[in-house]
Image (tube, grey):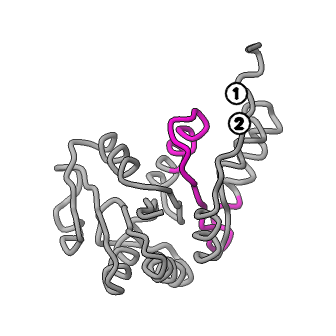
């Protein structure tokens, strides 16, 4: 595993523990010779993570859509910075550059990126590991939502095996390195194949 795409907040959140854990993740990435791929921002948790990896002499690739955000948001200290046309191209570029994905606390954009990459895994578009760094129980409601989706018959139990969950950055990276894609159940209940 050479490159991991990390989805996380462009805001810092309300807890100091978020920043502390993001800095630990940056250290773990560098210790494991894993380069960071992310959205290219210098603010919020995004900025904290990218700056920590750079500070530890790691490599960071950012992907930023043209003309969507103020130039003052862009981290111009990155190893590589790609400008793309729009958010769709941004997500595809980050996915193409990455061997795995991690979601940390963030807002709507983080959830959208997480669910898209999870959907792609469910459909077999990729077989890369997806990790949730569940800091301070942030993703507990998401896990409960997914379990309820299974209970209500809209998702198969095997889909949960697509997500690796830990609150510890080093443990999550170890889980991702050892990941073997699960055998997926037939997606559609009404289709007989």
The answer to whether residue 120 is magenta is: yes
Task: Using residue 161 as the reference point, say whether residue 5 is left or right of it.
Answer: left
SS at mark 1?
loop
**Vertical placement of 37 versus 119: above or below?**
below
Q: Which mark is residue 184?
A: 2
Left/right placement of residue 150 relative to residue 173 reads right
**Residue 189 sits in quarter:** top right
Nearer to the camera, 91 or 8:
91
* Number of other residues with Cα within 10 Å of mark 1, as a class: few under 14, some 14 to 19, many 20 or more: some
| Quadrant for the C terminus in the image | top right
> Quadrant of the rendered structure where residue 119 is?
top right
Location of residue 77 in the rendering, given as x and y in whole percent from the top left corner: 20, 75
Horizontal placement of 98 versus 119: left or right?
left
What residue lies at 37% left-to-right and 47% top-to-bottom? 96
x, y percent for residue 8? 46, 63
x, y percent for residue 66? 18, 49
Q: Nearer the viewer, mark 2 or mark 1?
A: 2
- Distance from the alpha carbon under mark 2 to that under mark 1: 8 Å
In percent of the image, x 57 and y 35: which residue is there?
124
Residue 35 sits above or below residue 93 on the image: below
Report which quarter residue 133 is drawn in.
bottom right
The residue at 44%/52% (across/down) is 109
- Which stretch appears magenta? 114-140
Residue 187, labelled with which disc?
1
Tell me whether circle 2 and circle 1 mark residues in contact (CB < 8 Å). Answer: yes
Q: Is residue 110 left or right of residue 65?
A: right
């Amino acid at each position: 595993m050479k490159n991991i795409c990390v989805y996380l907040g462009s805001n810092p959140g309300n807890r100091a523990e978020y920043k502390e854990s993001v800095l630990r993740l940056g250290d773990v990435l560098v210790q494991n010779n894993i380069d960071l791929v992310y959205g290219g921002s210098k603010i919020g948790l995004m900025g904290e993570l990218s700056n920590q990896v750079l500070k530890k002499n790691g490599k960071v690739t950012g992907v930023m859509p043209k003309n969507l955000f103020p130039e003052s948001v862009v981290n111009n200290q990155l190893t590589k910075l790609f400008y793309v046309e729009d958010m769709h191209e941004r997500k595809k570029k980050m996915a193409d550059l990455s061997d795995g994905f991690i979601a940390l606390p963030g807002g709507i954009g983080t959830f959208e990126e997480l669910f898209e990459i999870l959907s792609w895994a469910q459909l077999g578009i990729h077989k890369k590991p997806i990790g949730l760094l569940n800091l301070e129980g942030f993703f507990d409601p998401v896990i409960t939502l997914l379990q309820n989706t299974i209970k209500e018959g809209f998702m198969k139990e095997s889909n949960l095996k697509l997500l690796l969950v830990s609150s510890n950055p080093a443990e999550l990276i170890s889980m991702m390195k050892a990941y073997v894609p699960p055998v997926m159940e037939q997606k559609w209940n009404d289709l007989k194949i």
